[in-house]
Image (cartoon, helix red, strand yellow):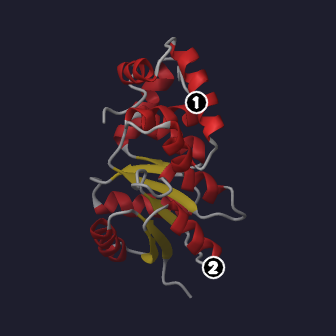
Amino acid sequence: MSAGIGVLLVDDHPVVRRGLRAMVDELPGVEAVGEAADGAEALRLLDEGARPDVVLMDLQMGAGMHGVEATRRITALPSPPAVLILTTYSTDADILAAVEAGATGYLLKDAPPEEVAAAVHAAARGETVLAPPVAARLLGRVRAGGRTVLSPRETEILGLVAEGLANRQVSKRLFISEATVKTHLVHIYDKLGVDSRTAAVAAGLAAGLIRAV
């Protein structure tokens, strides 16, 4: 029987995972029960019988399945574990995409161990946990009237376009068809009032919808 709350660590950097595992294993009532280098590997572990209470999920994981898509798929499983985002990114786009995908909480990697411990325990109880800077951003958006120009998926696509990815590369990264990418881009152009990829990226950066690469 588990000695505490089981945590699955998902991050593409082995050194970071080792550090996270050391930290998690020091947390009271918490233990690391597995590691994955990207979202696809995390899903395989769950499919093979891993039963963590909480998944500590990074957002950006190289060419592998990223954290938002993995969160979306994990939370769609029967009796899923809670997904707690642990990342360096705190833009509106990242936060909203993760929340829309079903994440229980959102922490930043510079959070002190005691904050991570409290968040893991809260997530295991089904409670929502937001790092103070993240909560402030969401509160500010609500106070501004909740104006979100793009959907989470459209924001993801625009972010990848900003990284220089072609439609085919975007489709492979997000596990969707190239035609679907093109359709999303048409909607993005229309919402932002632009007619090119370059203009869309510029508008997204100016509005704070995506990160500068």
Per the rendering, the mark at residue 49 is 2
Residue shown at the point (46%, 62%) measured from the top left? 38
> Considering depth in this image, is 62 or 94 the residue closer to the camera?
62
4 shown above or below 55: below
Q: Is residue 33 left or right of residue 108?
A: right
Quarter in which the N terminus is drawn = bottom right
Residue at mark 1: 151
Task: Give the image location of residue 32, x and y in percent.
Answer: 43, 76
Q: Position of residue 120 (x, y in %)?
A: 45, 62
Amino acid at dot 2: Gly
The local secondary structure at tag 1 comes to loop
Measured as percent of width and height from the top left, residue 131 is found at: 38, 46
Q: Residue at x 41, y 60 (%)?
A: 118
- Residue at x-position 43% and y-position 77%: 31
Give the CA distance from mark 2 to mark 1: 33 Å
What SS does tag 2 mark? loop
Q: Earlier in the sequence, mark 2 or mark 1?
A: 2
Whether residue 188 is visible to the viewer of this picture, yes or no, is: yes
Amino acid type of the residue tagged 1 in the rendering? Ser
Q: Is 15 situated left or right of 77 in this image? A: left
Mark 2 surroundings: few (<14), some (14-19) or many (≥20) residues within 10 A? few
